[in-house]
Amino acid sequence: MAIRRRSWLVTAAAAVCVPWTVRAQPADAVEAEKRAPPLPALGQVWSVPPMELLDGSRFEPRSADGQVLVLYWWASTCPFCAVTTPHLNAFWQRHRQRPGWQLLTLSIDRTREAAVRYLQQRGYAFPCAWVTPEVQRVMPKPKGLPITLVRGRDGRIVMAERGQLFAEDIEAIAQWL
């Protein structure tokens, strides 16, 4: 049932999200989305650059070596992210003390301040970086939003999803922890 519901939602989101995206984003962001790469293939090696987190700490890629790494691109203006992110936050709260995995969320908001404000207003405390042009050059966001990738302990993609995820979809990530 969840798979059928998700398939329907992805189809519906594609019809709604393209016009919404064009209206909600500046022209350069729309052009960047048109040039965005597809989701990575399962089994593809995925590298992550070092980056500053919004709380002032740093994500160092070597800290995730040999661990499961969940990557989640989002924006405060994305209606599908607004539905998915609370589920991801709940997952983070339940599993964050579990060793062997990390979560790194990536805000594509137009400003760092917008991302910080959104997180504070909702009480989200998961690790988050604002995607700078340098990060985007080294690790381009795949086409769509939200984007959820799970990189296995061997550095290869084991899950790649575009669009809204339901609570059961997020909870399924636990199989790789």
Image: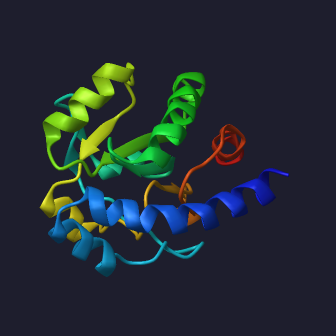
Q: Nearer the viewer, residue 112 or 149?
A: 112
Is 25 on the left or on the right of 102, as rendered? Answer: left
Is residue 60 depicted above or below 89 in this figure? below
Q: Residue 174 at what x, y percent from top left? A: 67, 41
Return the residue found at the far right. 1
Q: How many marks?
A: 0
Q: Is residue 80 visible?
A: yes
**Which corner quadrant of the image does residue 141 belong to?**
bottom left
The structure residue drawn at horizontal position 40% and vertical position 69%, both measured from the top left corner, is 142
- In the rendered view, tell whether residue 177 sits above or below residue 2: above
Q: Is residue 171 above or below residue 25?
A: above
Using the rendered view, name the quadrant where residue 103 is placed.
top left
**Is residue 111 toward the left or the right of residue 64 in the image?**
left
* Residue located 39% across and 66% down the image: 19
Which quadrant of the rendered structure holds the C terminus? top right
Counting from the top left corner in percent of width and height, residue 85 is at: 48, 37
What colouring does the structure picture have?
rainbow
Is the residue 76 above or below the residue 135 in the image? above
Horizontal placement of 167 versus 15: left or right? right
Q: Residue at left 65%, top 46%?
A: 173
Residue 159 appears in the picture as rendered: no
Residue 29 spot, x, y in % from top left: 21, 66
Q: Residue at x 58, y 31 (%)?
A: 91
Residue 31 rendering spot, x and y as whole percentages? 23, 76
